[in-house]
Amino acid sequence: MEASSGLTTTSESINHSDDGEKYANGVNWDELAFGITPTDSMYTMNCSDGNNFSQGHLIPYGNIELCPSAGILNYGQGLFEGLKATRTEDGRIMLFRPQENALRMKMGAERMCMPSPSVEQFVDAVKQTVLANKRWVPPPGKGSLYIRPLLMGSGSVLNLGPAPEYTLLIYVSPVGNSSPVGNYHKGRASLNLYVEDKLRRATPGGTGGIKSITNYAPVYQAQKQARAKGFSDVLYLDSVTGKNIEEISAANIFIVKDNVISTPALVHGTILPGVTRKSIMEIALDLGYQMEERLIPLEELLEADEAFCTGNSVTVNPIGAVTYDTKRVEYKTGEGTLSQKLYETLTGIQTGRLEDKKGWTLEVN
Ligand SMILES: Cc1ncc(COP(=O)(O)O)c(C=O)c1O
């Protein structure tokens, strides 16, 4: 089927894929990792006038075709988002604050000279994609359906400049509860982080504060080196002074000292404004904790009582240890920690176990 001159797919357009089965066959729901399982459908929506996205539609999940000179392939003009749909004990399927992802995509699109779908279009597209893949949403407690919206310059462009055409593509995959950056075993493994002292993730004035696809491959080298030494992931320092902590490859960081919770401030546009970060800050305040957003020198992390990171893939993940140069520091993890309490509250709201007094969840079925 021809979806546009920029991106084509070889599949027929469909309306939905729900054939009545509650769960997809052949999936071991107890062994889900953070990886790709091909599902039934994906969603595509185009913008060929440079401003407005037209009516999108569902198509079968599968490979796509792009012209060799597509803006995303040649100049990295693209953004992605990540969010999840979770099945509650009583069978409802819930999204968590999808409007926040839509707004972040809009903000990123502006920086990358791309048009973006409206918040309503984004949320509707996410809902349609989840509904069409309902049977891939894991049973309660077994994981969630990871949703990956991709906004890309799909039109042909040879001169350096914005593409003439854009596509929003949304695909999904069931994923387990274990962290993708944990110690590669199941459960909420605590993170063993390496503080990267040479390679920087983001610079002021750059794109660290948005989910540009171009932000991610450049951290592979640091991640690869750290993992080869047995670390789970990398913590990056600010690129101007090299003294303040910023974030992990795909998660925000918090520290706890004497019941005060702190997280690096977003002021220089080098840290991604995480939806989980924002939610945890609000939950911490509601629970009566002092919450600070500010510059955090590395020394403070090394002297903290607790540290944890947040992101939609890791939810709230305790940090067990941090290594800087030859110095290794360990933190409290597990029962009785603040990160455990925050994790329970956040996942309680996301899974319907706790009442959502904030209107953060959106039911899709
Ligand atoms: C660089 C980076 N920081 C932080 C996050 C956490 O953001 P969120 O809580 O919205 O998933 C992500 C993941 O999306 C990320 O890629």
Image: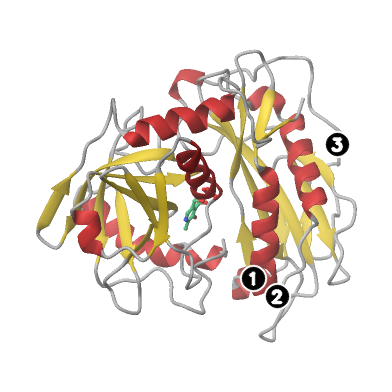
Quick check: 250 left or right of 333? Answer: right
Residue at 65 percent of width and 51 percent of height: 101
Q: Is residue 74 above or below residue 323?
A: below
**Percent position of residue 267, x then y:** 48, 70
Q: What type is the residue that disc 3 sits on?
A: Ile
The residue tagged 1 is 77
Residue at 29 percent of width and 27 percent of height: 336
Is disc 3 placed on a helix, strand or loop? loop
Q: Verify CB contact (< 8 Å) between mark 3 and mark 1.
A: no
The residue tagged 2 is 113
Q: What type is the residue that disc 2 sits on?
A: Cys
**Percent position of residue 349, x then y:** 57, 28
**Percent position of residue 241, x then y:** 30, 78
Query: Spatial distance from mark 1 to mark 2, Cα to Cα?
Result: 8 Å
| Residue 249 seen in the current view | no
Decide: few, some or many residues near mark 3? Use Cα within 10 Å; few <14, some 14-19, many ≥20. Answer: some
Q: Verify CB contact (< 8 Å) between mark 1 and mark 2.
A: yes
Q: Nearer the viewer, residue 4 or 129?
A: 129
Question: Which numbered dot is residue 14?
Answer: 3
Q: Quadrant of the C terminus?
A: top right
Is disc 2 placed on a helix, strand or loop? loop
Q: Is residue 324 above or below residue 188?
A: below
Query: Spatial distance from mark 3 to mark 2, Cα to Cα?
Result: 31 Å
Q: Nearer the viewer, residue 328 or 135?
A: 328
Q: Nearer the viewer, residue 173 or 13?
A: 173
